[in-house]
Image (cartoon, rainbow, N blue to C red):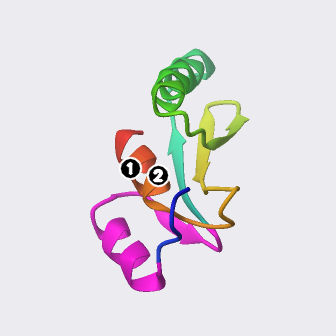
Amino acid sequence: MAELLNDSAIAAALADLPGWEREGDAIVRTAKLPSFPAAITVVDRVAEIAESRDHHPDVDIRWRTLTFRCSTHSEGGITEKDTALAASI
């Protein structure tokens, strides 16, 4: 089981994760890609990373805009699994 990060640890992690922000019990990043196929290519890459880590983000696809949301649902918040996955994304 992963341990929840406290507010200070989350803030410190976000300082090293450009483009990521905290939204409640998750860290979130939105990316705009040049085209829908390019966005899907990025989703495919993230899927490979997530599978290798056995930790999966929530992904919202809106044409060429992607939003990644990382939270450890089983723990009810943000853990090191989320910050590590965000760094890989």
Q: Mark 2–mark 1 contact, CB under 8 Å?
A: yes
Task: Point out residue 37 in the picture as x, y percentages from the top left corner.
Answer: 59, 15
Which amino acid lies under the numbered mark 1 shown in the image of this protein? Ala
How would you rate the neighbour count of disc 1 (Cα within 10 Å): few for under 14, some for 14-19, many for 20 or more? Answer: some
Given residues 61 and 89, the one toward you in this image is 89
Judged from the image, the secondary structure of the residue bearing numbered disc 2 is helix
Q: Can you say which quadrant of the picture contains the C terminus?
A: top left
- Whether residue 38 is situated above or below residue 54 in the rendered picture: above
Residue 41 horizontal side relative to residue 85, left or right: right
Residue 4 within the magenta-colored segment of the rendering: no
Task: Point out residue 54 in the picture as x, y percentages from the top left corner.
Answer: 54, 33
Residue at horizontal 35 percent and vertical 47 percent from the top: 87
| Residue for badge 2 | 81
Using the image, tell me which numbered label, if any, was put on residue 42. Answer: none
Segment colored magenta: 6-25
Residue 23 within the magenta-colored segment of the rendering: yes
Which amino acid lies under the numbered mark 2 shown in the image of this protein? Lys
Residue at horizontal 55 percent and vertical 19 percent from the top: 44
Residue at horizontal 50 percent and vertical 27 percent from the top: 34
Residue at horizontal 42 percent and vertical 56 percent from the top: 83
Task: Point out residue 61 in the picture as x, y percentages from the top left corner.
Answer: 70, 35
Residue 45 horizontal side relative to residue 18, left or right: right
* Residue farthest to the bottom, as pictured: 8
Using the image, tell me which numbered label, if any, was put on residue 84. Answer: 1
Residue 1 horizontal side relative to residue 49, left or right: right
* Residue farthest to the front, as pictured: 1
- Whether residue 3 is situated above or below residue 43 in the rendered picture: below
Given residues 3 and 39, the one toward you in this image is 3
**Total marks in image:** 2
How would you rate the neighbour count of disc 2 (Cα within 10 Å): few for under 14, some for 14-19, many for 20 or more? Answer: some
Give the quarter of the image for residue 12.
bottom left
Give the quarter of the image for residue 59.
top right
